[in-house]
Amino acid sequence: MRFIVILAVMLAAFSGPAWAQTAPNASRESHLHLAERYLELTQGGDLLKQFRSQIEDGFDVAELPADQRTWMVDSLTAIFTDVMGTVMTEMRDDVADSFTVPELEAAIAFYQSPIGRSVVRKQVTLSMEMQQTMMPLLVPRMTELSEKFCVRFDCTALADAAGKSSR
């Protein structure tokens, strides 16, 4: 009988830390699942359809034959879908580390609502419009910056650095 009591006390003493070790993992997995859901609502799903539609609109004005336009739209959509899948996987931990569980739950509830879905669609459209507005402004400034660099420093160093970063 004494042996059973000692065994029960030891089991109780050592099982507490073991249970405590599994709880944070389960908690973290739950947090990561919420982060994944948040990313899906704000960066995936319907947005991929919206992106494809915007690519199609962009190529409608291009003077390409229909089969070439279709090929480009399909190819760009596939690339974007693949990249976004990888980005969302890689960002999951960052999102979980940036947002608390209550913040993610609130954001998910919002982005699942009709208003939230509308906000996401509009944010994507505005983001693409912002990029289209920025590019003509950014390209000449970057060219000017490169020219200033070459006047002040050895341009081969800049070219070597650009070559290394593209690998």
Image (cartoon, rainbow, N blue to C red):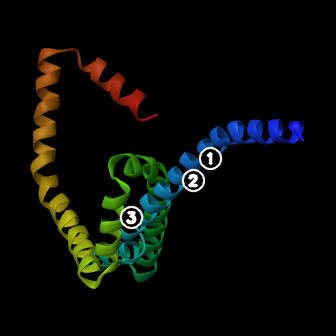
Q: In the figure, residue 126 lies in which quadrant?
A: bottom left
| Camera-side mark, 2 or 3 | 2
Residue 12: x and y, percent? 71, 42
Q: Tell me the kind of residue under disc 3.
A: Tyr
Q: What residue is pinned by disc 3?
A: 38
**Which quadrant of the view contains residue 73?**
bottom left
Q: Is residue 9 above or below residue 53?
A: above
- Residue nearest the observer in this picture, 19 or 122: 19
Q: Which mark is residue 105?
A: none
Using the numbered discs, state the Cα–Cα distance from disc 2 to disc 3 in whole angstroms. 18 Å
* Residue drawn at 30 percent across, 18 percent down: 157
The answer to whether the residue labelled 1 contacts the one labelled 2, judged by CB atoms less than 8 Å apart, is: yes
Question: Does 19 sit left or right of 129 as displayed?
Answer: right
Name the residue tied to disc 1. 22
Residue at image point 57% right, 47% down:
25
- Type of the residue with mark 1: Thr
Label 3 element class: helix
